């Protein structure tokens, strides 16, 4: 029993990663692990270390500097000491060193750790550059190509070790928080390497198509690429289709929505966890850290998928690839037609009207859908000027739908249409040709992308 190790009262979860030494001192003092005398001794030695470093900073010319410079040097010193303490096996060992080693000695140990960590940062930067994939995304390219140059060129381990001289805009699946200096850089580069490594299992052009499907101007976004690639890979696996293309059609997404919509959030996370393991197996991923990285993203991803199901926007989670050869489709519903008897009565009344104003009144009162408007335009025996006034009631999309469904037919094709349908085609063509060039071009272009459902 005498060999049982004393447990510290300090809760490690309350310690700051960025201000580790300071938070450890504070917690130790509050919990009674550090006496007032020990605390005072540490403060005095920290001030002496600051004075020594300040003299080195001014190259012996002065022992005093501006307050903000002194504060920066002190922060750098404390950060460096904290780096060393983090390398120790546990909090008890860290406290033992704080109590029994001079602060200057802890600083020297931390300085040695700093030098080793710069080598680690270089190692991960090399891996990131080696696994960098081709993409149009500017934030990704600039961050890797130029963002870390200031760090490796200007990082000052003597007086500004807590700072991060870099230009990092690209967002990660797992953002780096509560770290500073070289620790931040190592963690960021390590995470980025795992993301690059996952993306390396897919063709760069396919990834570009996925991101273009996410947003055609994705090259200007700060959004993470790997997250969308991972989501699409999961979607493919859930649909039992090849992962290589990272693509699905609307019908497949509808099926997936129907399969998943009855899951609660806990069930959904379990399903996605199983799916992630299947994706890892299919891709033959062997890197243990990458596996953990992907699995750690599932709680957040589960929420995204769950919300996509709840809002019927699963196509924003599992994004179909963009195909530059295909024109985007606008799905248009012409509405429900009125019953036959009501329609016949309205047409009879319409045809019996002596004045066109009365015909317009009938349209405004009874015609509520484009489907009924189309039928009336065909059956209404309208002259071109009358038809034009009715076409004026329609917006560009409605005119584009009619233009797609009723193009002016050549004489050879016209034999397949009734006289009423041909008149409708002629009236519509005449009307469109009277429109301003810009509006006509817009309507005709829209007609090529509309699919009536």
Image (cartoon, rainbow, N blue to C red):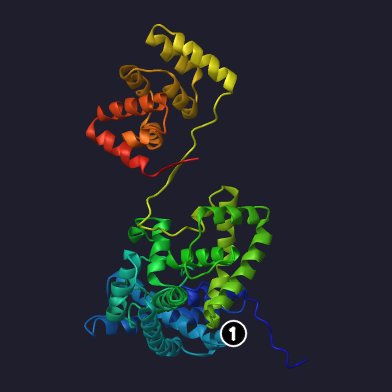
Residue 286, percent from left and from top: 54, 83
> Residue 384: x percent and y percent?
31, 20
Vertical order, 251 against 11 (above or below) = above
Using the rendered image of the protein, determine whether residue 13 is visible from the camera's viewpoint. no
Residue 217 lies in quadrant = bottom left
Between 422 and 327, the one lying in front of the other is 422
Label 1: how many Cα within 10 Å (few below 14, some 14–19, many 20+): few
Q: Which of 165 and 441 is in front in this view?
A: 441
Q: In this view, does 177 lie above or below 303?
A: below
The x, y position of residue 253, in whole percent, is 55, 55
Residue position for label 1 = 90
Query: Along the line of sight, which residue is nearer the eye, 32 or 22?
Result: 22
Q: Is residue 286 left or right of residue 135?
A: right
- Indicate left or right for 191 with 263 as reference: left
Answer whether residue 289 is visible to the viewer in this image: yes
Query: What secondary structure is found at the residue carrying circle 1?
Result: loop
Q: Quadrant of the N terminus?
A: bottom right
Q: Nearer the viewer, residue 73 or 237?
A: 237
Residue occupying the far right of the picture: 1
Q: Residue at x 44, y 73 (%)?
A: 202
Q: Is residue 66 left or right of residue 231?
A: left
Count of all numbered marks drawn on residues in the image: 1
Q: Quadrant of residue 376?
A: top left
Q: Where does residue 395 sit, x and y in percent of width and height?
A: 37, 29
Residue at figure coordinates x 56%, y 84% from the top left = 95
């Amino acid at each position: 029993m005498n060999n049982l190790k004393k447990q510290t009262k300090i809760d490690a979860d309350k310690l700051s990663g960025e201000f580790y030494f300071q938070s450890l001192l504070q917690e130790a003092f509050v919990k009674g692990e550090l006496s007032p005398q020990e605390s005072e001794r540490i403060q005095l030695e920290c001030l002496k270390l600051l004075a020594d470093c300040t003299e080195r900073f001014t190259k012996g010319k002065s022992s005093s500097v501006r307050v903000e410079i002194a504060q920066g040097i002190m922060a750098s010193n404390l950060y460096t000491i904290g780096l060393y303490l983090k390398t120790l096996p546990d909090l008890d060992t860290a406290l033992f060193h704080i109590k029994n080693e001079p602060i200057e000695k802890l600083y020297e140990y931390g300085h040695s750790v700093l030098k080793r960590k710069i080598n680690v940062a270089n190692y991960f930067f090399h891996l990131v550059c080696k696994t960098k994939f081709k993409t149009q995304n500017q934030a990704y390219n600039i961050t890797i190509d130029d963002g870390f140059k200031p760090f490796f060129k200007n990082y000052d381990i003597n007086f500004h070790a807590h700072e991060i001289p870099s230009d990092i805009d690209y967002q990660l699946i797992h953002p780096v928080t509560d770290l500073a200096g070289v620790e931040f850089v190592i963690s960021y580069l390590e995470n980025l390497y795992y993301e690059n490594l996952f993306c390396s299992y897919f063709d760069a052009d396919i990834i570009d198509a996925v991101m273009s499907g996410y947003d055609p101007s994705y090259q200007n976004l700060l959004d993470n690429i790997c997250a969308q690639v991972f989501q699409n890979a999961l979607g493919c696996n859930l649909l039992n289709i090849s992962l290589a293309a990272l693509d699905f059609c609307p019908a497949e997404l509808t099926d997936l929505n129907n399969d998943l919509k009855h899951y609660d959030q806990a069930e959904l996370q379990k399903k996605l966890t199983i799916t992630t393991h299947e994706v890892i197996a299919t891709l033959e991923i062997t890197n243990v850290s990458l596996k953990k990285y992907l699995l750690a993203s599932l709680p957040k991803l589960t929420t995204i998928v769950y919300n996509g199901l709840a809002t019927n926007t699963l196509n924003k989670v599992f994004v179909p690839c963009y195909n530059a050869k295909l024109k985007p489709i606008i799905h248009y519903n012409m509405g429900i037609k009125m019953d036959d008897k009501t329609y016949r009565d309205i047409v009879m009344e319409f045809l019996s009207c002596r004045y066109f104003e009365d015909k317009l009144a009938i349209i405004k009162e009874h015609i509520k859908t484009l489907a009924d408007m189309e039928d009336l335009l065909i059956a209404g025996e309208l002259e071109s000027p009358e038809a034009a006034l009715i076409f004026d009631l329609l917006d560009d999309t409605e005119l584009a739908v009619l233009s797609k469904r009723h193009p002016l037919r050549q004489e050879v094709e016209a034999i397949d249409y009734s006289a009423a349908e041909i008149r409708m085609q002629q009236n519509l063509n005449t009307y469109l040709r009277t429109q301003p060039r810009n509006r006509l071009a817009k309507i005709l272009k829209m007609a090529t992308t509309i699919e009536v459902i």
